[in-house]
Amino acid sequence: MDTSFTLENKVIDFGIIITCYKGDYFLTKGLLASIKYFLPNIPICIIQDGDFSLDKELYVYNISHIVKKADVKNDFLREKCFGSRCSNLIAFFEAPFERFLYLDSDLVLWGNILDNIDINEAEFIHNEPHEKYSERIVKEQYFDINELFKHTEYFNWKECHFFNSGVFIAKKNIFNFDELKELIDIWDFNRNIFPTDPQSILNIIVFRNMLKDNLKVSEKHLQTVVPVIENKDLIINFKIIDNQPQIITNTIIHWAGPKPNLLNSRKVFNIPMTYFRKQNLINVDSFWKNYPIIYFYFEEYLALIYRYHSKLTFNRINKKLRKYRWLQFSRLLREY
């Protein structure tokens, strides 16, 4: 399928890539509705992590590709990146687009984010950082500095503006696969080194290559991270008037913390996501478009059940893996 489209009178191979987990599927539908509202002509690729149907969305939204586990060609990526929240890393090697805007599921577009961005100015564009990165913050949010450099090459992390990896613009094939494999292997062996999984790995590989002049990196305003902004400011900046979003600044709203569920409505600002979840019901012509709140609570309870079941299953598997690694290590000691 042709994935080119015209931007500023130039025909380019560009698209949007979304990773969708079964537990976040109800949010992905809101995201898709926001893309249709603001960027309807850009093709979408969904990396689907889990067993669920996207049939309704396929016929309503500009989805050009759905990538499931069986579709991934690289054996290592196929086995390591699904079920571990690392599936966004697949995009760098097997994306159907030469350049892409990557989006997590827990966000919505609020305006045309591409209006003021030259997507060709760098090979990797990330959001402007909003914090100072002390050693404590880096350890809490990105990686254990002392432990990491026992296993891999050192880089001057103090020069880096670490970013939230829920939104970025990138070019395909900008990393060496063996370098990514090394970091995933380290994470797989000791997950305590990387508190935020793919975000940690992506920050390391981006900035290590940038500092070697192997990668051109740029910072732009891409997203508004909800936990960072006070509720009163969110209410002012993200209004719905006459059933239309009121755009003050083009941005992407990212709930990088508690999710914008109705179940969380007393704690989390969820008006933009709820609006686009309603738009999705209208877009797919669902019976529930006349009873959205009932449907949303049903969706959220199902997602909650799935998340808790998956977490319990993951903990059991992880416990067995730790036991297996310890047995391997003990055997090596005995042989030595």
Image (cartoon, rainbow, N blue to C red):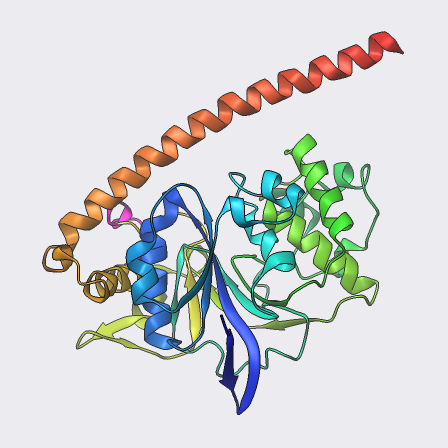
Front position in the image: 72 or 108: 72
Q: Nearer the viewer, residue 66 or 316?
A: 66
Q: Is residue 190 left or right of residue 7?
A: right
Q: Which residues are magenta?
A: 262-269
The residue shown at (43%, 42%) is: 50
Q: Quadrant of residue 159?
A: bottom right
Residue 267 counted in the magenta span: yes
In terms of image quadrants, where is residue 145?
A: top right
In this picture, residue 294 sits left or right of residue 321: left
Closer to the camera in the image, 306 or 139: 306
Q: Position of residue 260 (x, y in %)?
A: 32, 53
Q: Report if residue 232 is visible in the image.
A: no
Q: Quadrant of the C terminus?
A: top right
State the residue lying farthest toward the front: 1
Query: Is residue 114 part of the magenta span, yes or no?
Result: no
Q: Position of residue 27 (x, y in %)?
A: 34, 53
Outermost residue toward the top? 334
Which percent across, then down, holds residue 131? 59, 59
* Magenta stretch, main secondary structure class: loop
Q: Residue at x 34, y 61 (%)?
A: 58
Asked if residue 34 is positioned above or below residue 49 in the image, the reply reads below
User: Who is closer to the viewer here, 249 or 38?
Assistant: 38
Give coordinates of residue 217: x percent, y percent.
70, 69
Q: Is residue 333 visible?
A: yes
Residue at the far right in the pictured view: 336
